[in-house]
Image (cartoon, rainbow, N blue to C red):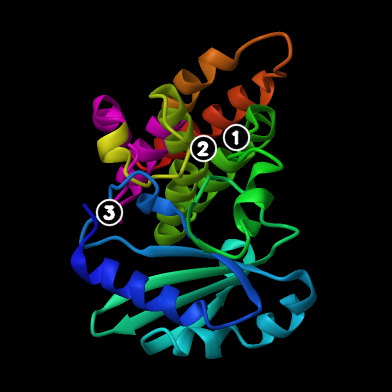
Amino acid sequence: MIPAEHQNFIDRAIEVMKLDYRIAGVALGGSYINGNMDEYSDLDFVIAINPEDTAQVMKERVQIAEKLGNLLSAFTGEHVGEPRLIICLYDSPLLHVDYKFVSLDDVGKRIEDPVVLYEKKDALSIALSKEPAVFPMPDIQWIEDRFWVWVHYCAGKIGRQEIFEAIEHISFLRQTVIAPLLLIKNGKLPRGVRKIEIDAPDDLPLLLKTVATHDVQSCIRALRATAELYICTRKPYLSESLLVRKNAEKKALEYLNSISERFI
């Protein structure tokens, strides 16, 4: 069930965007796809632009967003690796709304299948049908090559008592490595820590052990728990094709133990 305020915004936005001849189609992604929206949900629009109009529309994205509601603030999405994205906050109702402006030629390259709400001459549906959605999956070798270096780095920060830095680094490991692997184990997409309480409930006790407070011993315990949990989640990937960095693992854990002994 889509909240009424969200649906009203969607309906108004579609009517406005229909009037822009440069827009070939509009779709919604995210939780709208499976109908799991609630009052806390964002709206994730995909706006397909006629290829010849893309450059001009990109210059006018904020102005377009202003036409769709009482816009409080808007900025581009370089920080999440998506400069085509405009991230907006509206008032009356207070809603977070994302707009990804994409040339019709590029709309097929996507991580999910959005719900098409409006299109001209089936243009958006045809573009989406040309190739399947592909969600980026973790590269376990990429992780293995880096993980023990990250553990060593974090242990050094704990040793120097840069506790906030250590806390942030442990959080990075949870977001980048541990949570995605746990979600895959539970048959879910590896979306960082998003909805992990719902999607991996049986693993929460272990995951909670990776959460550190501003305390040396807490960080040591959390980093050790993170390393142990990685070793467990790595097991399904062990094969001849995975080059396990055994020496790096051994030395990083020995270093963590030496740091721990300094604070006994």
Front-most of residues 44 and 7: 7
**Dominant SS in magenta:** helix
Asked if labels 1 and 2 touch by Cβ distance under 8 angstroms, the answer is yes
Asked if labels 3 and 2 touch by Cβ distance under 8 angstroms, the answer is no
Within the magenta stretch, is there residue 231?
Answer: no
Relative to residue 187, is residue 202 drawn left or right?
left
Front-most of residues 186 and 121: 121
Amino acid type at image mark 3: Met
Which corner quadrant holds the C terminus? top left
Kindly tell me whether residue 208 is visible in this rendering.
Answer: no
Amino acid type at image mark 1: Pro
Q: CA distance from mark 2 to mark 3?
A: 27 Å
N-term-proximal mark, 2 vs 1 = 1
What residue do we see at 22% from left, 56% from top? 38
Relative to residue 40, is residue 43 drawn left or right?
right
Q: Relative to residue 49, is residue 183 depicted above or below?
A: above
Query: Where's residue 194, x and y in %?
Result: 37, 47
Amino acid type at image mark 2: Val
Kindly tell me whether residue 21 is visible in this rendering.
Answer: yes
Closer to the camera: disc 2 or disc 1? 1
Task: From the image, tell me which residue sits under label 1.
Answer: 138
Mark 1 burial class by Cα count in 10 Å: few <14, some 14-19, many 20+: some
Q: Which residues are magenta?
A: 200-227
Query: Where's residue 248, x and y in %?
Result: 66, 27
N-term-proximal mark, 2 vs 3 = 3
Q: CA distance from mark 2 to mark 1?
A: 8 Å
Total label count? 3
Query: Where's residue 201, x and y in %?
Result: 25, 30
What residue do we see at 64% from left, 39% from top? 149
Task: From the image, tell me which residue sits under label 2.
Answer: 177
Task: From the image, tell me which residue sits under label 3.
Answer: 37
What residue do we see at 75% from left, 59% from top? 105
